[in-house]
Image: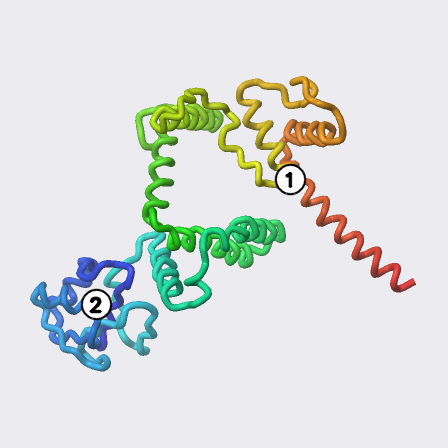
Amino acid sequence: MLTILLTSPRVAPGLLTWEAWSLLRSAAVVRAPAGHPQLPALRAAGVDVEVAAGPADGAVWLAPPGAYDAPPGSRVVAGAVDLPGAHLLDLVVVMNRLRADCPWDAKQTHVSLAPHLLEEPYEALEALESGDMDAFREELGDVLLQVVFHARIATDFDIDDVADGIVTKLVRRHPHVFGDVTVADADEVKRNWDAIKKQEKTERAVVSGSGESFASVLDGVPFGQPALSLAAQLQRRASRLGAPDSLAALGGDDGLGADLFRLVSSARAAGLDPELELRAAARRYRDLVREWEQSSSVT
């Protein structure tokens, strides 16, 4: 019987399962195509491998890494198993190839790609709102591409630096998971997160020599976001300190903007996201206008 040994291009050569090594050492004949990445590791381990164009009955065949259609009736053994997230390496490899060989990808800059940093998340949000999970998955891929693309363009950091940064941040801000801190509930987790984040900002100010040891709870709020979500984020941040959530209470001007700001506060008090609520109303309005158009054209 033919035995097919599958390996992963994402796992370093030689890092095979115990079952795979046992199979290779006990097999009468081991065959592999020329250039198979496992060849040097197997030969270094004393496994005699015959380079051949294809499999043979009674032999162990090291299939080319990646997808492989095993012949009917053959035994298939997984010699290397990808860890969760290993397929992200494929994206990095593809992006490197595009950056080197595609004229369009090669000429892109952080600035030229900047609009996509805004557009792609909104397309993902639209897919989520539609309930189409296949479309949502695809749009998340487009969002992920932006991260990998910018990391590839950068000259002072790479994708590993990006990953290291967020891993370090997550570990630091979850001491109840990675340390010895005990929390009672999710609200306490959020309070700890905010306190750690504030301390980080203070420490960065000291290290940078800016002379500003004061860290505002509003630091870091991006003003490039839509106005409704901006107002909601400012109010959420300020509420942590017990600050008023209206302009008038802080001596601000009144007017239409203040009225809208109060509506945002009302939405938050009801446990609603004002941006998502307005988007839902806009979708409903779109549908009703289309129905009106169709009924009007009929009459």
Q: Could you tell me which residue is drawn at 14 percent across and 77 percent down?
A: 50
Q: Is residue 191 left or right of residue 233?
A: left
For label 2, count other residues whose C-alpha is less than 10 Å away and answer few (under 14), some (14-19) or many (20+): some
List the single residue furthest toward the left: 46
The C terminus: image quadrant: bottom right
Residue 80 placed where, x, y %? 25, 60
Residue 194 placed where, x, y %? 45, 26
Residue type at mark 1: give it: Glu
Q: Where is residue 275, by image quadrant?
A: top right
Residue that badge 1 annotates: 275
Mark 2 or mark 1: whose residue is earlier in sequence: 2
Residue type at mark 2: give it: Pro
User: Looking at this view, is 101 or 290 the one in front?
Assistant: 101
Q: Where residue 126 is drawn, which disc sits there? A: none
For label 1, count other residues whose C-alpha is less than 10 Å away and answer few (under 14), some (14-19) or many (20+): some
Residue 212 placed where, x, y %? 43, 22
Residue that badge 2 annotates: 37
